[in-house]
Image: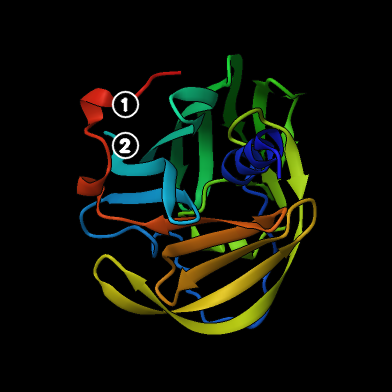
Amino acid sequence: MSARAFVLGLVLLVSLQVPAMAFGNQTSTNWLGGIPENNQLAYEVTRKGKRHGFQVFDFSRDEAGNLVVDVHIEINFKFGPITLFRYVHQNREIWRDGRVQSIVSKTDNNGDPEFANLQRQGSALVGSGTKYEGPIEDPIMPTTYFNPNFIHATRFVSTQDARVLEAEVREIGRETLVVPTGSLEATRFQLLGKLAIDIWYSDAGQWLRTEFSRGGNVLVINPVDISALPPRNEWARP
């Protein structure tokens, strides 16, 4: 498998995150169910056990009581000391009553700037992105995994470039996963569409794992303790 093929697959997984619809599963439909008490989620992106990137979610409330979700993603794919690919993504979403109210993001996609800037007006998100302009009517779900209702949707807006995506999924079954806090029962789903991705959620609704294969290589996104990631003062900016 070429480095370019690996990189393209990884970018699609992390930035597009094509999700889907599930049937009869045990995952909570509480849209806040995936947010831990410390208001933070951290993940690493690995290939053959080697870390190539990470993703962090920070949750807070604004003065109006809306949920504020700040997302930071970094990926660096290297061959020895040479950087073959660099990806940095920052996104802020505002949510109220389970509906996204705004998405504002900036991305450095290996030197190419991309963005999304969408604001809710009634039953639609209005604005533009690198690959979309105009109103996006409900129902729509951003391509961020924290909301477990993600797996009950069929239409999604990419937080990287505002493109609209559609997907389907099937439920695979129950598994036990090892996470930083111990072991958790999870439901595994398989996404069907442009990417063949498997994704796991706990019964409470927390995103626990994503996995997909490219050219015989398995890429995995797993939760980690944020102390295992680079300190914030070393994070890159898009």
Q: Quadrant of residue 212?
A: bottom right
Residue 127 seen in the current view: yes
x and y, in percent, of residue 113 in the image: 59, 15
x and y, in percent, of residue 151 in the image: 61, 64
Q: Earlier in the sequence, mark 2 or mark 1?
A: 2
Q: Horizontal placement of 119 versus 168: left or right?
A: left
Instruction: Please state which of the two labelled residues, at mark 2 or mark 1, is closer to the viewer.
Output: 1
Of residue 223 and residue 27, the one placed in the foreground of this image is: 223
Q: Horizontal placement of 123 versus 166: left or right?
A: left
Q: Quadrant of residue 225?
A: bottom left
x and y, in percent, of residue 48 in the image: 50, 56
The residue positioned farthest toward the front in the image shown: 80
Q: Amino acid at mark 2?
A: Ala
Q: Horizontal placement of 12 versus 192: left or right?
A: left
Q: Quadrant of residue 81?
A: top left
In the figure, 7 relative to 47: above or below? above
Labelled disc at residue 64:
2
Q: Amino acid at mark 1?
A: Trp
**Residue at the spot of label 1:** 235
Element on which disc 1 rests: loop
Q: Residues within 10 Å of mark 2 (few under 14, many from 20)?
A: few
